[in-house]
Amino acid sequence: MALLVQKYGGTSVGSVDRIKRVAAKVAAAKRAGNDLVVVVSAMAGETNRLLALAHEFSEMPDDREKDVLLASGEQVSVALLSLALKELGQPARSYLGHQVRIETDSAYGRAHILSIDSTKIVRALEAGEVVVVAGFQGVDEDDNITTLGRGGSDTSAVALAAFLNATACEIYTDVEGVFTTDPGICPDARKLQRISYEEMIELASTGARVLEIRSVEFAKKFSVPVHVRSTFSDVEGTWLVDEEESMTDVLVSGVTCDRNEAKITLVRVPDRPGLAAQIFSPIADSHIVVDMIIQNASEDGTTDLTFTVPKADHKKARAIVESALPALHAKGIRVDTDIAKVSVVGVGMRTHAGVAAQMFQVLGKEGINIEMISTSEIKISVVIDAKYAELAVRVLHEAFIGKQGKV
Amino acid sequence: MALLVQKYGGTSVGSVDRIKRVAAKVAAAKRAGNDLVVVVSAMAGETNRLLALAHEFSEMPDDREKDVLLASGEQVSVALLSLALKELGQPARSYLGHQVRIETDSAYGRAHILSIDSTKIVRALEAGEVVVVAGFQGVDEDDNITTLGRGGSDTSAVALAAFLNATACEIYTDVEGVFTTDPGICPDARKLQRISYEEMIELASTGARVLEIRSVEFAKKFSVPVHVRSTFSDVEGTWLVDEEESMTDVLVSGVTCDRNEAKITLVRVPDRPGLAAQIFSPIADSHIVVDMIIQNASEDGTTDLTFTVPKADHKKARAIVESALPALHAKGIRVDTDIAKVSVVGVGMRTHAGVAAQMFQVLGKEGINIEMISTSEIKISVVIDAKYAELAVRVLHEAFIGKQGKV
């Protein structure tokens, strides 16, 4: 008998009718002979409603109490889905983070799962019940309620699959799987049948929104087979699996585009040891995540230092850097929010040279200037003017993946 | 240093502004030198909203899942009140039922509190924090979430005061205390300064809505001084205390009126052993609470059996009794929903005879017919035609309490 962990996001459980539809889907999978653990998020809009409520009390709501507040959203959905299942004659039982002891560290709002106690879940499954678990939440050592951050329910589902040694973890979403690129930008985009965890991590970190990156890291660590598929159809989606030899035949599996970053340049800073720390320590202290960093040493002992931050944080980051300017003796600061980061990802790059060169050629041919470059073993990202973003995605997709490329 | 447990109901925390006002009140009490544990209910309307949601899935929602759903309401209020306190510079910390282990039995929807682990609360108080605890909820031995039933937050507060050995338990509500009768019916109604637990139990069970009866029983058992007072003023309210000698000087402390019952009469049932069990067992099995029962034996071996049930349950009760009619060989059934139960309550009755007689005279003088009578050691209740309810309350209040009566 297969044990499936299924995860349904906020849109899938966004209304009474949708919850009923999910219940029917779950009950059918149970009737087909599977044991089922179902992870749900808060109903669409609920987390934002609760956040707005918190902000009526404080501009910077206390992290611990914010987590107590937000965790109530999933509490509502697990109860409702269990009621819907029972109404269909399918025995079901809801569990919250503290009840199956999804133990996390104490980093409120972005906690990491450390362990899960499977005793109650196994007992309920043996009794023929569908187990419905609240995503996104856990408790720390001292029973304080924690949440895992946006998209945390993906991580809850994968972690449950890992600790329960499930046959598969099915992530139900509003798209049919992982695509070679955004079909909204490039009509040739194709659904991938299989993709390696590592590629998925790079795709997620460079702009693909289908899966929370941390959940993929978790899946990779415990080799959990993850199946990303649509809530609204029965079509096979995309499987996330360990890297297979045949995968390296393909140079590029996906092309992504991220328009949510801003670029900050410190112009002509006198270059000396400790410079980077002086800039980036206060930024890190403000919990701003810096993505790319590039520093070019110039002849005269000064350097231009450029980095990208989430667009939402660029004002805060600018203020931090500006207050440090006098001490740095920099000539000035430039901020550019009209940028896009376009990336190509593929495990084939590990064994095949020349992908970067080909990428630069393709972009150059279209007159697209490259402002920053960053590479990893299986990824090349470039920052370009935002107005060329779609064009860049299309020409790169055509060059590396094409209409009939091996996928 | 005094340790106060304060309880604020749904109306008191019914909006962002009201929560802020409660926070200001709590912070002031803390500044005045008290340690504070604050129990809150769900925001007004929230419990009903969640119940309605449950009913979109099932006519009879599963009790366990309903409790999981409803408990989320208090979770929201404790987080928001803690945020509001912190915003005022007052350190605060919220706790849910499972975190301070408010352990109950497993009777979902109407659980009884068995124990509370005060460790975390004491630690937080020692650290100077205001402790905000979710009312209405607990967990059973197996960590299932339970709720205590309507008005359960009163019980949570009194139980916390008992287990923490608090100086007093302050119940904040929208009236200024316990009155000799409903001021809306009788302009002479006066606020009581003190009342014994037993009288309060009788008042609550005969129609006074100010306190949940179970909370008073809890207070009596552990001799918790309870102070019922207004959220919206600083006026002293009413203290619930152990019976004091001087209290018995007063014959009647309060007059109550309950219009939420219906009367069911079985006409001319052949009287024989086991009759009552045959009728009331199936009613009890349907969780219908029978209040008064009266049976008059007649000459011919048949009897008229009359009892009252909550008005909301009278159709269900009628159906149960009707299906038993053939086996009972009764002549028929009569249901009357136009009734009122009017009661006088006072510990003075224990030592003074004649209260009942005087009550019947007062009502008789106004031409009010008495349909049923029920007495306890400190209470006399009569069922009368609903249209005389206000009149009966006024004449009884005047006769026993009057304008200047000792209170």
Image (spheres, coloured by chain):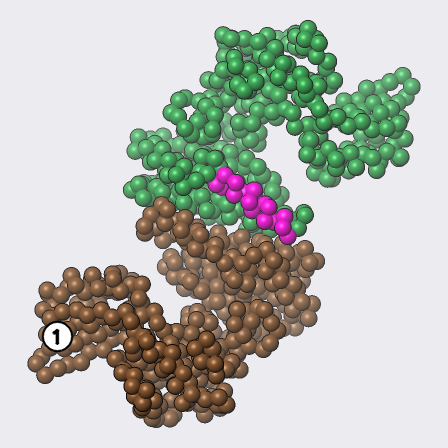
Chain colours: A green, B brown
Where is residue B9 shown, x and y percent of the image?
51, 64
Q: Tell me the SS state at disc 1.
A: strand
Chain letter behind tag 1:
B
Is residue A293 positioned above or below A367 on the image? below
Q: In which quadrant of the rendered view does residue B311 lie? A: bottom left
Residue A41 belongs to the span the image colors magenta: yes
**Is residue A311 at all visible to an observer of this figure?**
yes
Residue A369 belongs to the span the image colors magenta: no
Is residue B269 positioned above or below A88 on the image? below
Q: In which quadrant of the rendered view does residue A250 lie? A: top right
User: Which residue is tagged 1?
Assistant: B268
Residue at image location 52% in from the left, 34% down from the top: A155
Q: In which quadrant of the rendered view does residue B383 lie? A: bottom left
**What residue range appears in magenta?**
A39-57
Is residue A53 positioned above or below A394 on the image? below
Where is residue A85 shown, x and y percent of the image?
35, 41
The amino acid type, in three-letter code, at marker 1 is: Arg
The quadrant of the picture occupied by the N terminus of chain B is bottom right
In the rendered structure, the answer to whether residue B19 lies left or right of residue A41 reads: right
Where is residue A199 shown, x and y percent of the image?
56, 20
In the rendered structure, the answer to whether residue A14 lies left or right of residue A334 reads: left
Residue at image location 24% in from the left, 64% down from the top: B317
**Is residue A218 at all visible to an observer of this figure?**
no
Residue at image location 48% in from the left, 17% down from the top: A191
Where is residue B266 shown, x and y percent of the image?
17, 71
Is residue A335 positioned above or below A63 on the image? above
